[in-house]
Amino acid sequence: MEALSLLVAVEEAAAADDAKNANAAIGAGFAYGLAAIGPGIGIGYLVGKSVEAMARQPEAAGMVRTTMFLGIAFTEALALIGFVVFILLKFA
């Protein structure tokens, strides 16, 4: 009888660990989803304003395009940082 109660206790501990891992995965996915929203909006806004600037002053298109790509790189770095945090939350 004691072996049966020990087996039940082990199963309950395993279920608690599985629930903890599932909650960690859900939380990490939610965090990365939120972290990807900001850069997505930022890149969309940046490209839209750059196209507008190029349409208004075509002679400055080269400088605007260079600045746009730099802005996209910096904004995309935020999404990569969010991905790293996702990985840290998932496996920590």
Image (spheres, rainbow, N blue to C red):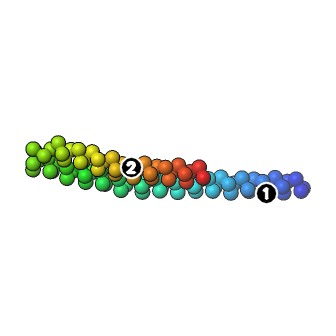
Quarter-wise, where is residue 17 in the image? bottom right
Place of residue 15 in the rendered image (x, y in percent of width and height, measured from the top left)? 69, 54
- Camera-nearest label, 1 or 2: 2
Q: Secondary structure at mark 1?
A: helix
Q: Is residue 26 something that shows in the picture?
A: no
Quarter of the picture containing the N terminus is bottom right
Q: Secondary structure at mark 2?
A: helix
Total number of numbered discs in the rendering:
2
- Identify the residue under disc 2: 77
Vertical position of residue 4 compared to residue 69: above or below:
below
Give the mark nearer the N terminus: 1 vs 2: 1
Label 2 packing within 10 angstroms: few (<14), some (14-19), many (20+): few
Place of residue 34 in the rendered image (x, y in percent of width and height, measured from the top left)? 42, 57
Left or right placement of residue 63 versus residue 18 in this view: left
Quarter-wise, where is residue 62 in the image? top left
Left or right placement of residue 81 versus residue 70 in this view: right
Query: For the point 31% across and 54% down, which residue is it?
Result: 41
- Identify the residue under disc 1: 9
Name the amino acid, label 2.
Answer: Ala
Tag 1 and tag 2, C-beta contact below 8 Å: no
Of residues 13 and 64, the one drawn nearer to the viewer in this rendering? 64
Name the amino acid, label 1.
Answer: Ala
Place of residue 49 in the rendered image (x, y in percent of width and height, measured from the top left)? 19, 53
Query: For the point 13% across and 46% down, which residue is it?
Result: 60
Q: Is residue 14 something that shows in the picture?
A: yes
Q: CA distance from mark 1 to mark 2?
A: 46 Å
Query: For the point 42% across and 48% down, which residue is it?
Result: 80
Label 1 packing within 10 angstroms: few (<14), some (14-19), many (20+): few
Of residues 14 and 40, the one drawn nearer to the viewer in this rendering? 40
Query: For the point 39% across and 52% down, which residue is it?
Result: 78
